[in-house]
């Protein structure tokens, strides 16, 4: 029995630490986020770039304080193309999905745009994120 306040406090922290220790091997398989200055290095792996891209997309979809819009994203390669999986603490709203589709379509057009127009397109993405 945990009668004393000190014992209760100690066990409150001890049990999660044991659980973290048990799950640690799983944690090592995760890709650690790369610092933004590493994004320009040519040695950055495609896998790390994808992870960073998804983290940034998830970040711009988390628009409301309180945790309901905290978002995670994943990619799935299918014969018909790439599928983006979106998860959040509550069901992603239609406006979030619409916003995300718009950003992805704009990014897609950015790849084939004339270099002179890229700044305008990038500014449009920034404006869209701020307004969202």
Image: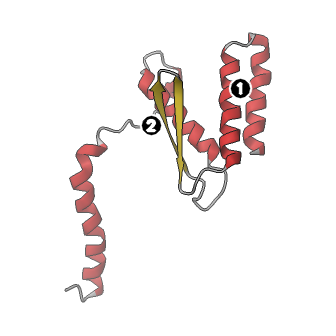
Image height check: is 116 above or below 90?
above
Q: Is residue 98 positioned above or below 125 on the image?
A: below
Give the vertical position of 20 relative to 121 (above or below). Answer: below
Residue that appears at 44% across and 28% down: 48
- Picture disc at residue 33: 2
Picture coordinates of residue 17, whole percent (x, y): 27, 61
Q: Secondary structure at mark 2?
A: loop
Q: Is residue 14 left or right of residue 95?
A: left
| Residue 5 sits in quarter | bottom left
Question: Mark 1 — residue?
Answer: 106
| Side of 114 where 104 appears, left or right | left
Q: Position of residue 7 (x, y in %)?
A: 24, 81
Q: Residue at x 23, y 85 (%)?
A: 2
Per the model, the C-alpha gap separating discs 1 and 2 is 25 Å
Residue 20 seen in the current view: yes
Around disc 1, counting alpha carbons within 10 Å, would you say few (fewer than 14), some (14 to 19), or many (20 or more)?
some
């Amino acid at each position: 029995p945990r009668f004393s306040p000190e014992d209760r406090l100690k066990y409150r922290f001890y049990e999660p630490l044991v659980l973290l220790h048990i799950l640690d091997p799983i944690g090592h398989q995760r890709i650690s986020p790369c610092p933004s200055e590493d994004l320009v290095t040519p040695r950055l792996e495609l896998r790390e770039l994808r992870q960073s891209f998804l983290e940034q997309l998830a970040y711009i979809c988390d628009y409301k304080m309180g945790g309901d819009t905290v978002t995670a994203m994943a990619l799935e390669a299918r014969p018909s193309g790439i599928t983006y999986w979106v998860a959040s603490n509550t069901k992603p709203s239609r406006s979030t999905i619409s916003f995300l589709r718009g950003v992805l379509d704009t990014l897609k057009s950015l790849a084939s745009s004339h270099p002179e127009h890229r700044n305008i397109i990038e500014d449009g993405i920034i404006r869209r994120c701020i307004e969202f």
